Amino acid sequence: MDGENELARLRDQLEQTKALYQGAKLNHDRALERVRDLGMTHPDGSIRHATLVFTYTLRNYRAALEQYNRFLLDHMSPSLEKLQDPKSERHRFNARTTALHGPH
C-alpha cells in the first residue's frame, strides 16, 4: 500500500473512532446525570454499560491516534510494523530521543 493510501486509511480510521468516542462520551455524560438524579443506590445499569462503551471507544480512538501519528512521524504503517528490523527501530528511537533530549 502506498503512503497516500495508507495515510487516507489511517485518517478515515481516526475520524471513525473519534466519532464513536464522542458519541459514547455523550451517552456516558447523560448516564452520569441520570445517576445523579436517581441516586447512587438506584439499580439502573445504564451507567455501567455507558462506562464500558466509553472506555472501549476511548481505547480505540487512542490506538487510532497513535497509529496515525506514528505514520506521520516515522512513515511507518502499523500493518508493516511486524516486518521491521528491531535494531532499526531502536536506532530510530535513539536518534529521536537524542534529537529531543540531547546526548546522554
Image: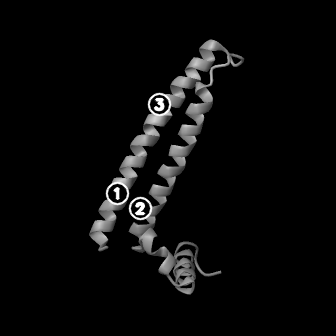
Q: Which residue is mark 3?
A: 26
Residues marked 3 and 2 touching at CB (< 8 Å) = no
Amino acid beneath label 1? Arg
Say what secondary structure mark 3 lies in.
helix
Mark 1 residue crowding within 10 angstroms, few (<14) / some (14–19) / many (20+): some
Q: Which residue is pictured at 50% across the width and 51% down the height?
A: 60
Spot occupied by residue 15 in the image (x, y as percentages of width and height): 36, 49
Element on which disc 2 rests: helix
Tell me which residue sits at (41%, 61%) in the image.
68
Image quadrant in which the N terminus is located: bottom left
| Mark 3 nearby-residue class (10 Å; few <14, some 14–19, many ≥20) | some
- Pick the residue in front: 91 or 32: 32
Which residue corresponds to mark 1? 11
Q: Residue at x 39, y 73 (%)?
A: 75
Alpha carbon distance from label 3 to label 2: 24 Å
- Is residue 76 shown above or below 33? below
The x and y percentages for residue 88 are: 52, 85
Q: Is residue 61 above or below residue 68?
A: above
In the displayed structure, would residue 76 be above or below residue 67?
below
Disc 1 from disc 3: Cα separation: 23 Å
Residues at marks 1 and 2 touching, judged by CB atoms closer than 8 Å: yes
Q: Which residue position is annotated with label 2?
A: 68
Locate the C terminus and report the quarter of the image it occupies. Answer: bottom right
Residue that protrudes farthest toward the right in the picture: 41
First reached walking from the N terminus: tag 1 or tag 2: 1
Separation (CA) of disc 1 from disc 2: 7 Å
Residue 32, label in figure: none
Within 10 Å of disc 2 (Cα), the crowding (few <14, some 14-19, many 20+) is many
- The x and y percentages for residue 23 are 43, 35
Left or right? Give the position of 87 relative to 42: left
* Amino acid beneath label 2: Tyr
Q: Give the x, y percent position of residue 41.
A: 72, 17
